[in-house]
Amino acid sequence: MADDAHSDLADRLRAQPTLTGVAPPLDVQALPSDPVALFVEWLDLAISDGVAEPHAAVLATVDADGVPDARTLILKDVDARGWAFASTRSSRKGAQLSAHPVAALSFWWPSQVRAVRVRGRVVEASAEESAADFARRSAAARDGVTEGDWTLWRLQPARIEFWQGAADRNHTRIVFERGPDGTLVRARSEEKTA
C-alpha cells in the first residue's frame, strides 16, 4: 500500500509542469564584467516585470555538526561589499554564522525562469550599520527585538552562478569565481542539459 502511494505521488510530481515562465532575452557576450552589476540588472528586471518578492532568497548555513540548515529571508542590499541580510545574533542562523561564517544564498524567479546562487564567507557589518538597518524596520518588526541583538551580515561571494532555464533543457549558466588576486572574474558561460 505504501509503495502504491509513493508511486502515485511520484507520478503526480513528474506530471507537474516545470519551467513555465518566459525567459528574458539574454546575450551572454554583452553581459557586464561585474557580477554585482549583473545581479542588480537581473533584480531590477524582476522588479519591473512584477516578479513576486524578487528580494526573497533562501539562506543556507551549517550547524555545529556540519549539517546544512536553510530558511527564506529578505535581501537588504547588494554592493561590492557583498549581499546583505539581517536577523538577530541570538537566532539559530546567528549562532551558526558565528561558529561557521560561510553561507549560500539562492534566488529563484520562476516567471522569468531565472535563478542566482551566491556562496562564500559571511562577515558582520559594523554596529552602526546594524543599528541603521534595525531603525529602518517598522515599529511592529522591532517589537520584542533588542537593538543590540539585531545584526546585519554580508555574504562575500567566492562563487556566483547566474542560471537561465530553457524549455529544451539547454540551460545557460554564467559563473563568476574569486580569482587569486581576490577579484570576481567570469569563469565561464555554458549551455547544457540538466
Image (cartoon, rainbow, N blue to C red):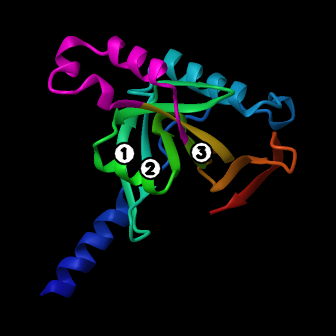
> Label 1 sits on what residue type?
Gly
Instruction: Name the spot of residue 107 as percent of width and height, x first.
Output: 50, 40
Q: From the viewer's perspective, is 181 left or right of 87?
A: right
> In the depicted view, which residue is nearer to us: 100 or 112?
100
Choose top left, top right, bottom left or bottom right for residue 78.
top right
Choose top left, top right, bottom left or bottom right for residue 185.
top right
| Circles 2, 1 touching at the beta carbon (< 8 Å) | yes
Mark number for residue 94? Answer: 1
| Rendered view: 193 above or below 98 | below
Q: CA distance from mark 2 to mark 1?
A: 5 Å
Q: From the viewer's perspective, is 113 left or right of 189?
A: left
Q: Which residues are magenta?
A: 123-151
Instruction: Name the spot of residue 12 as percent of width and height, x first.
Output: 29, 65
Instruction: Name the spot of residue 184 as percent of width and height, x first.
Output: 78, 41
Mark number for residue 159? Answer: none
> Label 3 sits on what residue type?
Val
Residue at left 17%, top 17%?
140
Callout 1 crowding tier (Cα within 10 Å): few <14, some 14–19, many ≥20:
many
Residue at left 44%, top 69%?
66
> Label 2 sits on what residue type?
Leu
SS for dot 2? helix
> In the depicted view, which residue is nearer to us: 185 or 65?
65
SS for dot 3? strand
Q: Is residue 70 magenta?
A: no
Which label sits in the foreground, 1 or 3? 1
Mark number for residue 118? Answer: 3
Q: CA distance from mark 1 to mark 3?
A: 19 Å
SS for dot 1? helix
Residue wearing tag 2: 97
Q: CA distance from mark 2 to mark 3?
A: 16 Å
